[in-house]
Structure formats: C-alpha cells, structure tokens
Image (cartoon, rainbow, N blue to C red):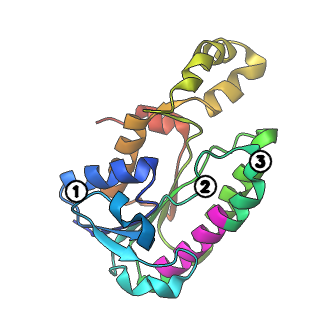
Amino acid sequence: MQPIFITGGTGYIGRRLIRLLIKNGYAVAALVRQQSLAKLPSGCTAVVADAFDASSYVNSIAAGSTFIHLLGVSHPGPAKKALFYSIDLAAAKVAAEAAAKAGVAHFIYMSVAQYPVKMMASYQDARLQAEQAIRATGLKSTFIRPWYIIGPGHYWPLLLQPLFKLMEYIPATAGKAKSLALVSLQKMLQTLLTVVKELPEEPVRIIEIADIKNIKP
C-alpha cells in the first residue's frame, strides 16, 4: 500500500479518516502544529511543521505516496470570506507545491460543490482556485466536491431535508437541490477511502455529490 500524507488530520473529518486508513493497513503521516499534537489519533506519524511553508515538510512526504489535503477553515460561513483565501487557498497552494516537489503519486483534495450559491461564493471561488493550482502542477489528482456533511454535531441541516426533497420535484429548483444535497459523514469517509484505493486513470478525477452518494462500502 502507498504511504499516506495528510493535512487537516486533527479536524472533524481528518481524525476519523486517519483511524479508518490505519484500520485498513495504511501507514499515515499527518502534518500538525505543535499545540495540536495531542489531537492526532494514535498510530500515525506526526510531522510538526508549518502548513504555509512547503520547505518545512516537503522532506517528510514519501515519494510515490498519496497526499490528502483536508486543511481549511472550520465551520465556513459568509463572515469568513478573507480566511478562505488566506488559509484555505494559501495552504492548498503550498500543499500542491510540496506534493509536486516530493513526487507524490496521487493528490486528493477536499473541495466543495460548485453550483453557484451567492452567500458562499468566496468559499467556492477559493476552493476552485485551489483546484486550478493543483491542476497546474500536473499531479494526478482527485477533487471531491461535497456541500454539507451530516454527522455528530452537524445534524441541524436535516431539518431542511424535506424542503430539499420538494425542490427536487420542481423543475426550476431540481438542479440546485441535487447539486447541493447533504451527504453523510460515513459516505464521505467511504468516498475518501475508495479514492485512496483507486488511482484515477485520467489526470484529474472529480467526485461530485451524486458520486459520493453512490459510493459502495
């Protein structure tokens, strides 16, 4: 199995993904800040470095490995517009640079659905620019584009589920409802595990919400 290098490993998805990868036999190294070391799951190798300085961790990335970039602003909202560029986009550009220099075999990026949503336009734009920066490296890549992920502590959008179901049956809103559908945390983790196992044939593979929902265990 290819070794895994992951950023955002102490986050909501990252912690759970590391445990899942280790359970499936992968050797995982995770970029982490000194003050967050205790948040990393046991069994992975901690790489204490600066996510905004490629030179601080490029030598810790194994050649031929799979790089998973999850780092980003937690609980994104319209008020965090500036952070989407100074953190999400900036860190993704640095990660792409480091991964290219290290010679990784596969770069997996947690992006976001690109159906236009005015109040989250900056978030979508920053993630799209990150995709473009990764493409520019020539790395074989997978972009995963969820919208909102339902799981422990993140269940409130389920209140909107009946509305989304209704919107799917109205021609004028069907596209939006399907393009911004909710996905479960379990589906998201299974999707990440699946794309880790399956190196894409094409230079860039894009996993949309419909694809996430169709992922089989």
Q: Amino acid at mark 3?
A: Ala
Q: Residue at x 42, y 37 (%)?
A: 185
Give the structural element (helix, strand or loop) at label 1.
Answer: helix
* Rendering coords of residue 203 (x, y %): 50, 65
Q: Is residue 91 magenta?
A: yes
What is the magenta range? Answer: 87-99
Q: Earlier in the sequence, mark 2 or mark 1?
A: 1
Judged left or right of residue 46, residue 175 is right
Judged left or right of residue 24, residue 4 is right
* Rendering coords of residue 171 (x, y %): 74, 17
**Alpha carbon separation for disc pair 3 and 2:** 12 Å
The residue that label 3 is drawn on is: 79
Q: Residue at x 77, y 52 (%)?
A: 122
The residue that label 1 is drawn on is: 22
In front: mark 3 or mark 1? 3
The residue that label 2 is drawn on is: 73
State the quadrant of the N terminus: bottom left
State the quadrant of the C terminus: top left
